[in-house]
Image: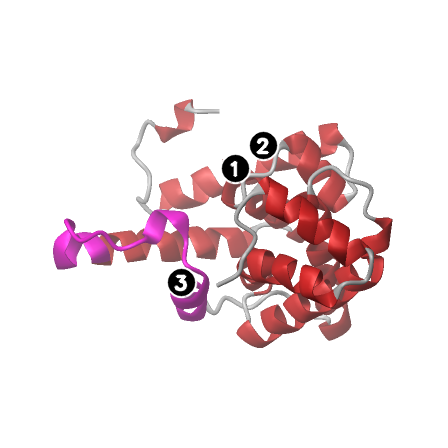
Amino acid sequence: MHAVDSSAAEARALEAARRGDVAGFNQLVLAYQTVVYSVALRMLGNTDDAADATQETFVSAFRAIRDFRGGSFKAWLLRIAANACYDILRRRQRRPASSLDALIDEAGLDVGEPDEDRGPEGTALSSETARAIQAGLATLPEDQRMLVLLCDVQGLSYEEAADATGAALGTVKSRLSRARARLRDYLGERGELPSDSGRHH
């Protein structure tokens, strides 16, 4: 696999892509297609929609790559991905589905990965937790859910998430705080968190 494996390689691929080099852009696609698809799948809850959003993201990114002005390419790309997801939600005029089996199997969740040492019982419990988290995500408003995906799943900073969503920094922080509180409450009600989890803010 010829994915971008260093910041220097990414910079070279970016420079080539900005000159219109398809091979350079393809390196970026290989490096980020899993990230984009994972965000889209968790946001939209449907594999077909996620595939459409991923394709639209990279088509739009290729058209706009000459306008990339530096900074975090990942944040820039995820802003395009966020817009693609919102476009699909508006176009199809429905709430995201909760295809939990597809989401867990195809995208995975950080907390739900099987562990060889857990045994069947432990693996089943972690899968239940992963399903509960995805179900909790599906209850959040779209703007809050996107921020959880960008910051807590993809590791973007508040500033990068603000850039990716076009929201003010203070808005990002307040929405994310509300989203995390709602997720804590949702999981706590279902016994997925220890009773003292509410003390962490």
Tell me the CA gap for discs 3 and 2: 25 Å
Asked whether the beta carbons under mark 1 and mark 2 sit within 8 Å of each other, the answer is yes
Label 3 belongs to which residue? Answer: 104
Label 2 belongs to which residue? Answer: 177
Q: Tell me the residue at 60%/38% (across/down).
A: 156
Where disc 3 sits, the SS reads helix
Residue type at numbered disc 1: Arg
Residue type at numbered disc 3: Ile
Q: Could you tell which of marks 3 and 2 lies nearer the N-terminus? A: 3
Against 81, is 92 above or below? below
Q: Tell me the residue at 75%/68% (across/down).
A: 59
Q: Is residue 201 visible?
A: yes
Residue type at numbered disc 2: Ser
Q: Position of residue 129 (x, y in %)?
A: 33, 51
Q: Main secondary structure of the magenta part?
A: helix
Q: Position of residue 86 (x, y in %)?
A: 73, 60
Tell me the CA gap for discs 3 and 1: 20 Å
Residue stretch in magenta: 100-123
Q: Quadrant of residue 8?
A: top right
Q: Tell me the residue at 31%/53% (across/down).
A: 113
